[in-house]
Image (spheres, rainbow, N blue to C red):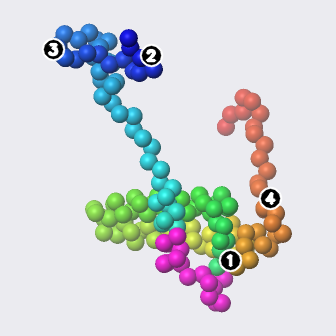
Amino acid sequence: MADLDEPYAPDVSGDLDELTDEERDALNDADVDEEEEFDLTPLFLEWVEEHLAVVEYTHSDKSTAVWCPEWWKHPEAVERLWATFEARQQAKIDAAEHADALSDWWLTHWDRHAAILFDGKAGPFRNCDRNLGHLHDSDGSAPQRVPYYPPPEGWQR
């Protein structure tokens, strides 16, 4: 008796030309492996650690750059870092055909996002201290988000 939880797979021990359309469709469906989504999070975390530890130098007395050791608690920072990570991955792929792809990544992506990430007045870490921690300068309260009200039903641009 067939297991009802298993997808139907026709018996193909005979000639393929003798299969019905339904059996042929089932066979085609059985051959297609569902593409698994690859989790880039471990690669992203490794990239953030290596990039920031090796490339960025924000701990000198002369630096005005701010940083939060708990950077992952800042949605804007996470999104900016993720965007630069994905662009870096693409630049590495494109570098095979375009010698300036990695240089373009620095100028177009990293430099622009880093200017905002490390901005002590307006950046996402403005209320944090690299030594004293997350939201140190705001008594632990998160900054107020932009208020948002959804448009009324039926609204059109």
Asked whether residue 140 is drawn in magenta, I would say no
Residue 54 magenta-highlighted: yes
Question: What is the C-alpha distance between the residues marked 3 and 4?
Answer: 68 Å
Foreground residue among 4 and 46: 4
Q: Which residue is mark 1?
A: 130
Cα–Cα gap, marks 2 and 1: 57 Å
Q: What is the distance, in whole Å, between disc 2 and disc 3 at their CAs?
A: 26 Å
Disc 3 versus disc 4: nearer the observer: 3
- Identify which amino acid the numbered label 3 is placed on: Asp
Task: Tell me if I can see residue 123 in this picture.
Answer: no
Task: Check the image and name the residue furthest to the right.
Answer: 139
**Label 1 crowd bin: few (<14), some (14–19), many (20+), radius 10 Å:** some
Amino acid carrying label 2: it is Leu
On screen, residue 40 versus residue 33, left or right, reads right
Of badges 2 and 3, the one in the foreground is 2
Measured in 3D between alpha carbons, the distance from the residue under mark 4 to the one under mark 1, in whole angstroms, is 21 Å
User: In the image, is residue 49 above or below residue 74?
Assistant: below
What's the residue at 45%, 43% (across, down)? 37
Which residue was labeled with disc 2? 4
Q: Which numbered mark, 3 or 1, is in the foreground of this view?
A: 3
Q: Determine the residue positioned at 19% across, 10% down.
A: 18
The residue to which callout 4 is attached is 144
Q: Earlier in the sequence, mark 2 or mark 1?
A: 2
Numbered range of the magenta stretch: 49-64
Q: Nearer the viewer, mark 2 or mark 4?
A: 2
Label at residue 15: 3
Q: Which mark is residue 40?
A: none
Q: Residue at x 42, y 41 (%)?
A: 36
In percent of width and height, residue 41 lies at: 51, 56
Query: Which tag, 3 or 1, sits closer to the chain's start?
Result: 3
Disc 4 element: loop
